[in-house]
Image: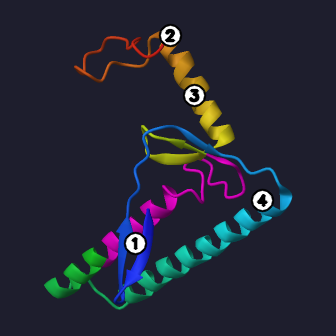
Amino acid sequence: MRSFNLNSKVYLVRITMRKKRTISISHPQLVRFRNTRREVLSAAESVGQRRLLDEGRGLEPTESAMDMEKTKILSDKQHGLARAWNKSLCTCSLCGSRTSNMTFNPFMEEWFCVDCYGKNQEFYKAEARKGQIWNSENYARTPSTKWWP
């Protein structure tokens, strides 16, 4: 998701990809540049979370309906910010790595480091061979072997 500020309102834009993508950077200066930018974005996300927590500190959701509504809105904003960060290119969805090359999984719509993506692929292949991956089309308890020979 990309966000931009227009007239002091923040808008999130979701970009959908349909194919697996791997972004690999091997040049040391570019790796350092990428990691530095990820750290800056991480710091900005932390500041946003702290700001939302500070806004909610004085609210008592048991006292009034207005406080309950404000608490719900702040909680939704915190959850949305955390979800956007976890699904971003900046961090691996499994291990949280911020310094690795990333691969996009279009089915889950998340980014994984190359190591975690490989481990997931090996797991699903092994489970499909055993017949443990179930068919989701008709929700039957029949092994799905359509996608793996």
- Asked if residue 64 can be seen in this view, the reply is no
- Quarter of the image for residue 103 reads top right
Q: Amino acid at mark 1?
A: Gln
Between circles 4 and 1, the one closer to the viewer is 4
Estimate the spatial distance between the alpha carbons at disc 3 and disc 2, rounded to whole Å: 14 Å
Q: Residue 79 in magenta?
A: yes
Tag 3 residue:
121
Residue at 56% across / 56% down in the picture?
A: 89
Amino acid on which the number 3 mark rests in the picture: Gln
Residue with the mark numbered 4: 31
User: Which residue lies under the disc numbered 1?
Assistant: 78
Q: Amino acid at mark 4?
A: Val
- SS under mark 4: helix
- Mark drawn on residue 35: none
Question: What residue sits 56% from the left and 78% below the top?
Answer: 44
Mark 3 vs mark 1: in front: 3
